[in-house]
Image (spheres, rainbow, N blue to C red):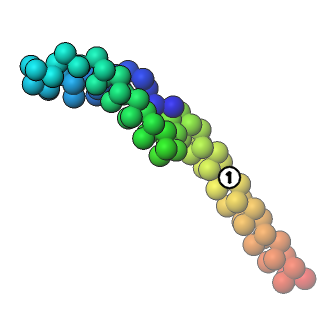
């Protein structure tokens, strides 16, 4: 999930750049901009850094197991050929 503070910061910075006449609409713009950003980012199907790191660790363990199994298969094939 995207950090709500980041979305708030972005919407505050964008609305802060408005000309003086439009600053009366600043709160509405901030709310709408934040909602739009959140909806767009949710559509991207992003994962958190923590989720990414967990999956990376799982993948690394899986690769290690595959390499060990490949080595074991090679040794067994060699034994069969030697018999």
Q: Is residue 55 above or below residue 19?
A: below
Residue located at (79% from left, 77% from top): 78
The quadrant in which the C terminus is found is bottom right
Task: Name the foreground residue: 54 vs 61.
Answer: 54
Q: Is residue 16 visible?
A: yes
The image quarter containing residue 36 is: top left
Residue 29, horizontal then vertical, whole percent: 28, 25
| Residue, far left | 20
Q: Residues within 10 Å of mark 1 (few under 14, many from 20)?
A: few
Tell me where residue 79 sits by quadrant.
bottom right
Residue closest to the eye, 52 or 39:
39
Residue located 35% across and 27% down the image: 32
Where is residue 22 drawn, in percent x and y? 15, 22
Please tell me whether mark 1 sits on a helix, a strand or a loop. helix
Coordinates of residue 65 in the picture (x, y in percent): 71, 54
Q: As drawn, which residue projects farthest toward the right? A: 83
Is 45 on the left-hand or right-hand side of 28?
right
Left or right, residue 35 beside residue 51: left
Count of all numbered marks drawn on residues in the image: 1
Seen at 78% across and 69% down, the residue is 73
Q: Is residue 30 above or below residue 73?
A: above
At horizontal 19% and vertical 15% (from top left) the residue drawn is 24
* 69 in relation to 2, above or below: below
Between residue 11 and residue 55, name the one nearer to us.
11
| Relative horizontal placement of residue 72, taking residue 1 as reference (left or right) | right
Query: For mark 1, what is the residue?
Result: 62
Whether residue 49 is visible here, answered yes or no, is no
Q: Is residue 53 left or right of residue 66?
A: left
Q: Nearer the viewer, residue 15 or 77?
A: 15
């Amino acid at each position: 999930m995207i950090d709500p503070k980041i979305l708030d910061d972005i919407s505050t910075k964008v609305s802060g750049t408005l000309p003086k006449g439009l600053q009366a609409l600043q709160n509405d713009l901030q709310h709408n901009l934040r909602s739009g950003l959140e909806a767009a980012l949710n559509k991207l199907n992003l994962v958190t850094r923590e989720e990414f790191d967990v999956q990376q660790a799982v993948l690394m363990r899986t690769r290690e197991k595959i390499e060990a199994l490949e080595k074991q298969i090679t040794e067994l094939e060699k034994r069969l050929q030697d018999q």
